[in-house]
Image: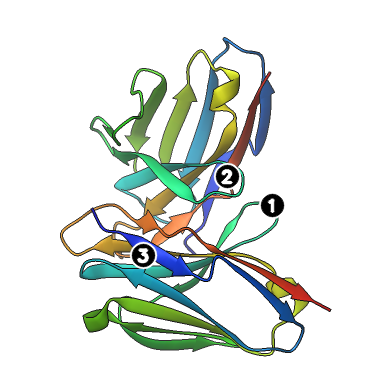
C-alpha cells in the first residue's frame, strides 16, 4: 500500500518549452501533496504544498508563475515547469499524505528533468 | 521553521560493521521519518517514528522526542545498504516535512 507514482521518470527538453509532471497516489486518497526539488548531492527542498481543490502554497523563492501546480483530484497533482531553462534542470519528487493516516508521507520515484 | 541536522555527513563502512546515524531537530514534532535514497533517486520509507523504538530486520530506529533527536542503527552492514540516508521532521504545529542534509553511506566489500 501507499504507493505514489510519477510520470515521466525522465524528460529532456529544449530551453523555452514547458514540461508537465504528473504525480498520482495509487492506492490512497491524498488531500495534500508536496513537490520537492533535489540538486545533485544535495538534500530535498520543498517547493510547494498542493491541496486538492485550492491554490498551491509556494515556498519562499519559488516562482509560482514558473512552476504551475494543479491538484484537481484526491489522487492527482501536476507540476508544469513553464518556459524551462537549463537552471531548471533537476530531480523533482512529489509526495503525498494519506487522507486517513495523514502523519506519514510517501514519496514518488522522482522525475529527472534536463533542459538543453 | 524547524531545523533538521544529520551527522555524520559521510560514512564509510566495511561490510559486516555496525553504525549509528544521528538526526537532531529543533522543535517538537508529530512526524519523524527515515528514508534511504537508492541510486535511482527513489526514497524508500524506512521508519515513521515520531517517538519510541522500532526495528525492521537489520535496521532499527529510536526517537527521543523530549531531547529532540533520532538515531538510525544499521547492523551487519551489506553493500546494498550504500546510499544516502535522510531523516525528515514535521513540527507539531506545521504542515511541512523538512529534510536533513543526509548521510552518505558507502559499504565496502
Of all chains, the one bearing label 1 is B
Q: CA distance from mark 1 to mark 3?
A: 22 Å
Q: Residues within 10 Å of mark 3 (few under 14, many from 20)?
A: many
Q: Residues within 10 Å of mark 2 (few under 14, many from 20)?
A: many
- Kindly indicate whether the residues beneath marks 2 and 1 are on one polypeptide chain: no
- Kindly indicate whether the residues beneath marks 1 and 3 are on one polypeptide chain: no
Report the label total.
3
Give the left or right position of residue B26, taking residue B18 as reference: left
Furthest residue toward top: A16
Look at mark 3 in the image and give the residue it sits on.
A104
Look at mark 1 in the image and give the residue it sits on.
B40
- N-terminal of the pair, mark 3 or mark 2, is 3
Quadrant the C terminus of chain B occupies? bottom right
The spot of residue A27 in percent (x, y) is 46, 56
Toward which corner of the image does residue B67 lie, by quadrant?
bottom left
Look at mark 2 in the image and give the residue it sits on.
A110
Amino acid at each position: 500500500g501507499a504507493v505514489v507514482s510519477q510520470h515521466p521518470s525522465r524528460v529532456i527538453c529544449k530551453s523555452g518549452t514547458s514540461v508537465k509532471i504528473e504525480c498520482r497516489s495509487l492506492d490512497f486518497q491524498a488531500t495534500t501533496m508536496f513537490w520537492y526539488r533535489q540538486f545533485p548531492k544535495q538534500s530535498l527542498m520543498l517547493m510547494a504544498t498542493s491541496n486538492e481543490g485550492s491554490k498551491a502554497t509556494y515556498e519562499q523563492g519559488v516562482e509560482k508563475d514558473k512552476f504551475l501546480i494543479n491538484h484537481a483530484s484526491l489522487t492527482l497533482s501536476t507540476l508544469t515547469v513553464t518556459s524551462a531553462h537549463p537552471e531548471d534542470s533537476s530531480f523533482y519528487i512529489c509526495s503525498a499524505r494519506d487522507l486517513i493516516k495523514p502523519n506519514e508521507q510517501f514519496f514518488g520515484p522522482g522525475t529527472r528533468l534536463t533542459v538543453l | 521553521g524547524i531545523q533538521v541536522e544529520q551527522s555524520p555527513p559521510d560514512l564509510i563502512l566495511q561490510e559486516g560493521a555496525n553504525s549509528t546515524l544521528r538526526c537532531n531537530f529543533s522543535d517538537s514534532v508529530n512526524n519523524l521519518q527515515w528514508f534511504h535514497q537508492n541510486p535511482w533517486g527513489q526514497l524508500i520509507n524506512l521508519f515513521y517514528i515520531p517517538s519510541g523504538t522500532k526495528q525492521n530486520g537489520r535496521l532499527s530506529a529510536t526517537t527521543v522526542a523530549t531531547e529532540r533527536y533520532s538515531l538510525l542503527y544499521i547492523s551487519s552492514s551489506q553493500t546494498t545498504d550504500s546510499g544516502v540516508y535522510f531523516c525528515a521532521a514535521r513540527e507539531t504545529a506545521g504542515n511541512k516535512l523538512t529534510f536533513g542534509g543526509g548521510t552518505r553511506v558507502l559499504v565496502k566489500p
